[in-house]
Amino acid sequence: MGKIKIGIYELTGCAGDALLILDCESQLLDIFQAADIEAFLMAKSDNSHGPVDVALVEGSVTTEEEKEELLAIRDRAEIVIAIGNCACEGGIQAALTASENWSKEFRQVYQDLKLTNVKPIPSQPIDAFIKVDYYLPGCPIGQEQFLTTFTRLLAGHPPELYRFPVCMECKWRENDCLLNKNLACLGPLTKGGCGAVCPSHNLPCIGCWGPAEEANRSAEFKLLLEKGFDLESIKRRMAIYAGTTIVDFFNQLKKEKS
């Protein structure tokens, strides 16, 4: 069997996930020798647009041109993996995005500027347009997480991620719960895998690994209100890394209040 063909593609984002892959300096030569890296704009100039076994896609879809690029990637890839929060959830640029507000907010920034090269659209995660096979969360993804996933792909196995929140990792490290110290920690809402690095240094989790499966947002929201945090600060904190996934939650809260 030949080497697995991998393409690494970047849409709208900070390119932090692609940069993290480049930062695997001691393993980088092994990565390029173990697989055929067909496309990786940050690392090579002779990028191919042919078929690949695995496409790693970073960034959210923010223009019509990116939407078309993403559809083309899906057509030529056997497996598509969303890497990083922008691809998985829409990223910070998609926080609290709502169709009725997007045009107004866009005009506030760009006013009447005519855009001739691109056609902007509300930022969305890539699974709003294509089928995504696997997700690697994080802002950015973790090096150990990427290398483990890469090794599993070489062996023909899918990525295997933690399915529990950051709180579990805090328990493993015997950390005191920061919520009990009246700090607005989002550990109960956030996917595990980061090693609880922030709470381990007495810094509240801000959710940068994206929403955990079965996260109880209502309970966290009510708890933070009870601890005296104001509505807008809670909303901003819960939304910053949750992308489009938080929109329905706050829309429902708005309906309940009205």
Image (tube, rainbow, N blue to C red):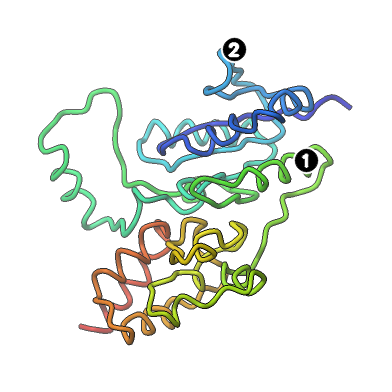
Task: Give the residue drawn at x 43%, y 66%.
Answer: 204
For label 2, the crowd category at 10 Å Cα-Cα, with few meaning under 14, some 14 to 19 and many 20 or more, is few
Instruction: Left or right? Give the position of 52 relative to 167.
Output: right
- Frontmost residue, 130 versus 249: 249
Residue 219 in which image quadrant: bottom left
- Quarter occupied by the C terminus: bottom left
Furthest residue to the top? 46
The numbered mark, 1 or 2, whose residue comes first in the sequence reads 2
State the separation of the CA atoms marked 1 and 2. 24 Å
Counting from the top left corner in percent of width and height, residue 16 is at: 48, 38
The N terminus, quarter of image: top right
In the displayed image of the protein, which residue is found farthest to the left? 112
Badge 1 element: helix
Judged from this view, the residue extending furthest toward the right is 1
| Number of numbered tags placed on the structure image | 2
Q: How far across and down, in percent of the image, does residue 32 sit?
A: 72, 23
The residue wearing badge 1 is 151
Specify few, some or many for label 1: CA neighbours under 10 Å numbering under 14, 14-19, or 20 or more. Answer: some
Q: Position of residue 131 (x, y in %)?
A: 58, 48
Identify the amino acid type marked 1.
Thr
Of residues 208 and 198, the one nearer the viewer is: 198
Amino acid type, callout 2: Asp
Query: What residue is shown at x 75% (from left), y 49% (from top)?
Result: 158
Residue 164 vs 76, above or below: the answer is below
Q: Quadrant of residue 80?
A: top right
Q: Which element is circle 2 on?
A: loop
Mark 2, residue position: 46
